[in-house]
Image (cartoon, grey):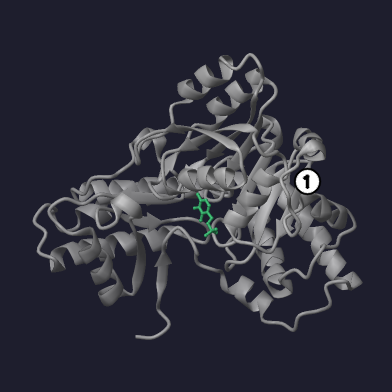
Amino acid sequence: MEDKHMLMIPGPTPVPEKVLLAMAKHPIGHRSSDFSEIIAEITENLKWLHQTQSDVLMLTVSGTGAMEAGIINFLSPGDRVLVGNNGKFGERWGKISRAFGLEVEEITAEWGKALDPEAFREKLAADNQKSIKAVIITHSETSTGVLNDLETINKYVKDHGEALIIVDAVTSLGAFNVPVDDWGLDVVGSGAQKGYMIPPGLGFVSVSAKAWKAYETATIPKFYLDLGAYKKATDKNSSPFTPPVNLMYGLQMALQMMKAEGLEGMFSRHRRLTEATRAGVKALGLPLLAADEVTSTAVTAVMPTGVEAEAIRSTMKKHFDIALAGGQDHLKGKIFRIGHLGFVSDRDVLTAIAALESTLITLGYQGATPGAGIAASSKILG
Ligand SMILES: *Cc1c(COP(=O)(O)O)cnc(C)c1O
């Protein structure tokens, strides 16, 4: 059957019909006063979403572009940075940092485990010369479904005093509390196709006053991603280059929808969807990759035994037109990931768990009692 595709991957995420319809309009001039009004509203609401009075800038890039901008604007070649690496994205921020000549020290954890805040504390406390210029952390590590303890790590960064905290909040913003000003997060990167409920194509970076101070002396070359130009334009409700006008119509609508739900509403919905997904999967006898204490509220990674992860994914796709994500790198073929980020409801999770049960029966899996998954998920959602 056509047009029944269901996205349960951690990005791109489903897009509400209201947002799709908002985008189905003629583009208008990006220097027009009508468009300035849209930028003004979006900027205001982005600050609300980030819980900040400081700047949130919008770039025509994917999430990686937002993070690249967040790194290169505030540092100089040779600067020492601590990078948390416990998955695909943490690994990427180390690669970007090296590409721009930063001196990278990685703090690693096994994929599926959280970064140990104590390891950051030790490195930062030992840095009497204050040579560590930034700590770069992935808050929600999408490749494994692990949420790192940003709040605690950030406390140690604040104790250090000098280093900036640069955060990949691509799959935590909107799904988990990220109070930028309360915590004093200097740079926070995110991307459209995750918690924002719009299609891919926009990246966002929040910048603190402390980060702007670092910007003044940072010497890594930049042009398209020079955040100073974005700040100057944003202050005048404009953009330095042509923005994706129609995507921004969608963003305007999506932010209005988020405001109507409220931050607490969004966070508690994601928490509930996560618990229901995990309870359903556990009841089916399938092991979860991340422990309950460190779970991301955007994505649940499952490491099945007695049945192939890729067979589950292809059967879910073939029989139910439900897209699940696979594993990356060494977890390829070993895990599958259920996204529950953004425009996802209780019904979507129940549908996914029911389809998963049916798939397991189709594949001849013996480890579950039929109905056990749905019963466990319903308990949480009921
Ligand atoms: C999706 C994602 C990104 C950005 O990826 P892009 O493909 O560049 O949009 C960055 N970090 C995390 C944790 C992500 O999930």
Q: Residue at x 27, y 76 (%)?
A: 318
Lateral position of residue 301 relative to residue 285, left or right: right
Q: Nearer the viewer, residue 142 or 8?
A: 142
Lateral position of residue 203 relative to residue 117, left or right: right
Lateral position of residue 16 relative to residue 54, left or right: left
Q: Is residue 262 visible?
A: no
Q: Is residue 367 visible?
A: yes
Mark 1 CB lies closer than 8 A to ligand 1: no
Q: Amino acid at mark 1?
A: Asp
Q: Nearer the viewer, residue 57 or 275?
A: 57
Q: Position of residue 302 (x, y in %)?
A: 28, 50
Q: How many numbered discs, if any?
A: 1
Q: Is residue 192 above or below residue 174?
A: below
Q: Position of residue 301 (x, y in %)?
A: 33, 50
Q: Residue at x 32, y 47 (%)?
A: 278
Q: Nearer the viewer, residue 101 or 207?
A: 101
Q: Residue 27 appears in which quarter of the rendering?
A: bottom right
Lateral position of residue 184 relative to residue 213, left or right: left
Q: Secondary structure at mark 1?
A: strand
Q: Is residue 73 above or below residue 115?
A: below
Q: How many C-alpha atoms fall within 10 Å of the one at disc 1: few (<14), some, or many (≥20)?
A: many
- For the N terminus, the image quarter is bottom left
Would you name the residue on which mark 1 appears? 55
Q: Position of residue 21 (x, y in %)?
A: 64, 78
Q: Position of residue 253 (x, y in %)?
A: 68, 66
Q: Residue at x 57, y 15 (%)?
A: 125
